Image (cartoon, grey):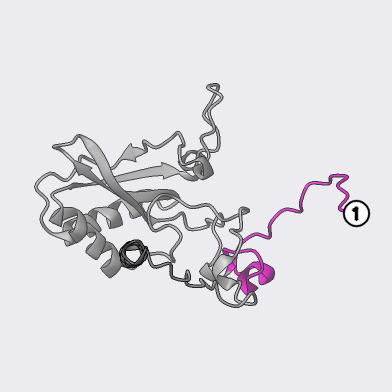
């Protein structure tokens, strides 16, 4: 009996040694409920955006030059494109029935008119800035963007706005791009959003 009792003790000790240690899961806090500024609602009216960086204020020449340098560092060819305000922003996909809004992540009219030819062999961002200025003088009421083309993969790898039409009011200032922001309430230089549709909803 003593041997059996000793054997049981050895087994229990062995089981205890390999038993997993269960620790209490850390409590994850999302912060105070009052801190809702990090979870605001995007203002969908008069607040259009175009691909990369269009959620930012207009880029300065220096900022555009740095982005062009990024394209060059990656071996991409800068291309300048422009399009009228009526055709630059696509909200439908014609008769295909596809959802081509920017909210769906897929939209038509991605090909704008190209300014001259792709700038093969370009090594200086200032050359691109000069062409942007020339395009702006020729088409001040058009959207102008810079695209980066990878001639090996045969795809466009980057694109960002370099100029908006002079009287463009389709975007909101930075402090008015979320519902409830001060800029959205005051207008901030943009046209006021249209009233919501009249529906007989009841929340009672």
Secondary structure of residue under mark 1: loop
Query: Residue 31, relative to residue 93: is it above or below?
Result: below
The answer to whether 192 is drawn above or below residue 180 in the figure is above
Q: Which residues are magenta?
A: 176-204
Instruction: Judge whether residue 158 is colored magenta.
Output: no
Residue at (76, 51) in percent of width and height: 196
Q: Quadrant of the N terminus?
A: bottom left
Residue 34 appears at what percent x and percent y? 64, 77
Q: Position of residue 14 (x, y in %)?
A: 30, 64
The location of residue 96, given as percent across then percent down, is 52, 22
Picture residue at 20% right of the left edge, 59% below the top: 70
Q: Is residue 127 left or right of residue 158?
A: left
Q: Is residue 200 magenta?
A: yes
- Is disc 1 surrounded by few (<14), some (14 to 19) or many (20+) residues within 10 Å? few
How far across and how far down the image is residue 98, in percent?
53, 28
Q: Main secondary structure of the magenta part?
A: loop
* Quadrant housing the C terminus: bottom right
The relative height of residue 27 versus residue 177 in the rendered view (above or below) is below
Q: Which residue is mark 1?
A: 204
Left or right of 62 in this view: 5:
right
């Amino acid at each position: 009996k003593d041997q059996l009792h000793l054997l049981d003790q050895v087994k229990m000790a062995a089981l205890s040694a390999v038993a997993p240690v269960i620790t209490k899961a850390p409590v994850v806090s999302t912060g105070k409920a009052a801190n809702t500024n990090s979870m605001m609602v995007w203002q969908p009216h008069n607040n259009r955006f175009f691909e990369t960086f269009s959620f930012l204020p207009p880029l300065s020449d220096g900022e555009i030059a740095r982005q062009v340098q990024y394209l060059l560092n990656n071996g991409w060819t800068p291309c300048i494109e422009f399009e009228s305000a009526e055709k630059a922003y696509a909200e439908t996909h014609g008769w295909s029935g596809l959802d081509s809004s920017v909210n769906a992540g897929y939209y038509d009219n991605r090909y704008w008119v190209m300014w001259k030819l792709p700038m093969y062999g370009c090594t200086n961002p200032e050359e691109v800035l000069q062409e942007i200025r020339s395009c702006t003088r020729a088409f001040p009421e058009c959207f102008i963007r810079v695209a980066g083309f990878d001639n090996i993969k045969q795809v466009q790898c980057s694109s960002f706005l370099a100029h908006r039409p002079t009287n463009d009011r389709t975007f909101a200032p930075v402090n008015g791009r979320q519902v409830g922001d001060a800029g959205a309430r005051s207008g901030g230089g943009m046209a006021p959003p249209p009233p919501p549709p009249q529906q007989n909803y009841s929340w009672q």
